[in-house]
Amino acid sequence: MSKSQSRNHAVLIVSGGMDSCVLSYYYAAAGFDLHLLSFNYGQKHLKELTYAKRYVTHLRERFGQGPRAIQVSYDIIDLPIARLLTNSDSALINADLEMPKGHYTDDSMKATVVPYRNPNMLLQAATVAWNEHASVVAFAAHQGDYSQYPDCREVFVDSFNAMLAAAMNSEEIKVESPFMRFTKAQIAALGSSLSVPFELTWSCYEGGNNGLGDQHCGSCGTCVERYEAFKLAGIPDPTVYANNPERFLAIPGQSNL
């Protein structure tokens, strides 16, 4: 795609989760050609990539036809993050650490921090964007990530954009995170308005392990966060949970079962 062409082109970082799925449909609905990138960085929940492929297929079928058709490409990139972090205290990549259960707290979120994960992914995405003359790189950080994930904050995005500009003496590529001030419930509501196929997304950090197959465990922080988002947004939750996440909630005005 040449820089003289007028059509918008974005490179998006996507997992199999609901936030990045909504991000994909958000940019597709805005008319962007998309190159979606997922990453195998040694995460336990590698099952998310299977679900990413599923909603990418749906995205192509929905937006890849007609007079306003967009182009959608998808790739999985291997990053050796887990191999480099041999002494990691992140439960996402250390097989010896148990995944925290229940609603996220500051401590349980700390247990899922993977150092420099987003910078690594964004640099790969920016390289692809440069090659394809795309002007936008985007990822789906949201308000709930702010407290314990430093690379999900506005100051990080601003600094990363400054680094990209300095590295190539160019401001042609900008990193965006349009959901930075959204709650997860607001993302769910936006996704519902875009008819996002939430049944094709995967959030569980157990990753279908422990013999659960395609059931979310219902106990890890991401399962509880997912369940709560649908509940607060007032939209149906298509997720099959092995355990009821309701018992971990304390939503004002509602019982904590």
Image (cartoon, rainbow, N blue to C red):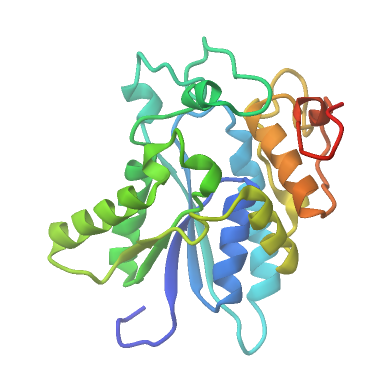
Is residue 28 placed above or below 56 in the rendered structure? below
The residue under the point 55% across, 22% down is 108
Q: Is residue 29 above or below residue 126?
A: below
Q: Which residue appears at 50% of the width and 67% of the height?
A: 34
Q: Nearer the viewer, residue 76 or 184?
A: 184
Residue 210 in picture, x, y percent from top left: 72, 17
Q: Quadrant of the C terminus?
A: top right
Q: Quadrant of the N terminus?
A: bottom left
Q: Where's residue 144, x and y in %?
A: 55, 42
Q: Tell me: 177 left or right of 156.
A: right
Q: Residue at x 80, y 46 (%)?
A: 231
> Image quarter for residue 243?
top right
Q: Is residue 247 left or right of residue 221?
A: right
Residue 30, compared with residue 255, is above or below; it is below
Tell me which corner region of the image, top left, top right, bottom left or bottom right, holds residue 221: top right
Total numbered badges shown on the rendered structure: 0
In the drawing, does residue 50 fall left or right of residue 36? right
Residue drawn at (63%, 90%) of the image: 67
The x and y percentages for residue 206 are 65, 25
**Which residue, as the protein is rendered here, is positioned at the far top?**
96
Front residue of 110 and 95: 110
x and y percentages locating residue 116 in the rendered image: 33, 35
Judge from the rendering whether residue 230 lies leftward or rightward of residue 21; answer left or right.
Answer: right
- Seen in the picture, residue 42 relative to 180 is either above or below; the reply is above
